[in-house]
Image (cartoon, grey):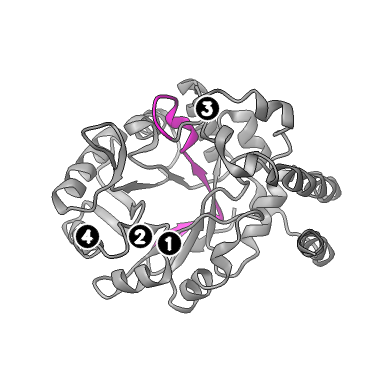
Amino acid sequence: MQVRTLGNSDLKITPVGYGAWAIGGSGWQFAWGPQDDNDSISAIHRSLELGVNWIDTAAVYGLGHSEEVVGRALKSWRGPRPYVFTKCVRRLDESGQLRTILKSASIREEVESSLRRMGVDVIDLYQIHWPPNPDSADLEEGWSTMAELKREGKVRWIGVSNFNVDQLKRAAAIAPITSLQPRYSLIHREVEAEILPYCQGYSIGVIVYSPMGSGLLTGAMTRERISNLPDDDWRRRHADFNEPNLSRNLELVDLLEKIARNHGRTPGEVAIAWTLQNPAVTGAIVGARNAKQADGVMRAAELHLRGEEVLQIAEFFAASVA
């Protein structure tokens, strides 16, 4: 695969990276249902065999379990070590609810736990997972701590996730931001108006998550499959997977399937390739729960959509709004 420089870093990343959210397994608030760890490791290894050179996870995915699985996959992988990206500040409070905690002591505790779980000496990109409430000064404390961890050599580069432009400006006043990780897909384009142009203007790398709409745009997500999702799969309750949005989203998938057939590819690859055509986007985080799924999506960076295909997609959305 080709590589692209991520923001102000020396990281040369492939346009597609392996996303480890779903492999956290069950037992937490944003789980994707049960997951076999051996399948997860096979998915990671297959992605690396296909040329992917980075893995993105987070301490909160499976409450540490995703990082543990990533660590096992790294230990048994015989090729060059991929870059490892992870995220902090989402933690359980005393009542068992997820909270965003940007206090220095908490972040320092988290980074040590992440290093241990993944079995690495340094984290290539460490990211604040979510910002605090808008009026909180914790953003400044948290980002200052991230900058200290970089100076200390615990992490190589630092980034943020789910920040708006104002929050990016507050962080940048303290220390340079290597990258932003926002949600971005054909069905979630909110970042196009302000956030992506800001990042492009200030040379902040962008690695987008959920480019396939959390599986909705893969072509495998039928009404029947959605109705049979496990009770602890967060997608069961999400508006994208329920009416009135579901019908339009499945119509979009029909269009992606037609475009995919023109290239001998999958609808998911078309959805990923569409995000990668945006000049502000450096890379896309792509999940796979087994090796077969990895085969169907990890080569999406090689797919170049034709101008008329991009226009077809634009016309679909224009018609759905009219």
Which is nearer the N-term, disc 2 or disc 1? 2
- Taking the view exactly as shown, the residue that stands out farthest to the front is 244
Front in this rendered view, residue 177 or 247: 247
Q: Are marks 3 and 4 in contact (CB under 8 Å)?
A: no
- Magenta region, residue range: 10-29
* Mark closer to the observer (1, 3): 1
| SS of the residue under disc 2 | strand
- Which label sits on residue 138? 4
At 53% across and 46% down in the image, what residue appears? 52
| SS of the residue under disc 3 | helix
Which is nearer the N-term, disc 4 or disc 1? 4
Q: CA distance from mark 4 to mark 1?
A: 18 Å
Q: CA distance from mark 4 to mark 2?
A: 16 Å
Q: According to the image, label 2 marks what residue?
A: 159
Which is nearer the N-term, disc 3 or disc 4? 3
What amino acid is found at the position of numbered circle 1 in the picture? Answer: Leu
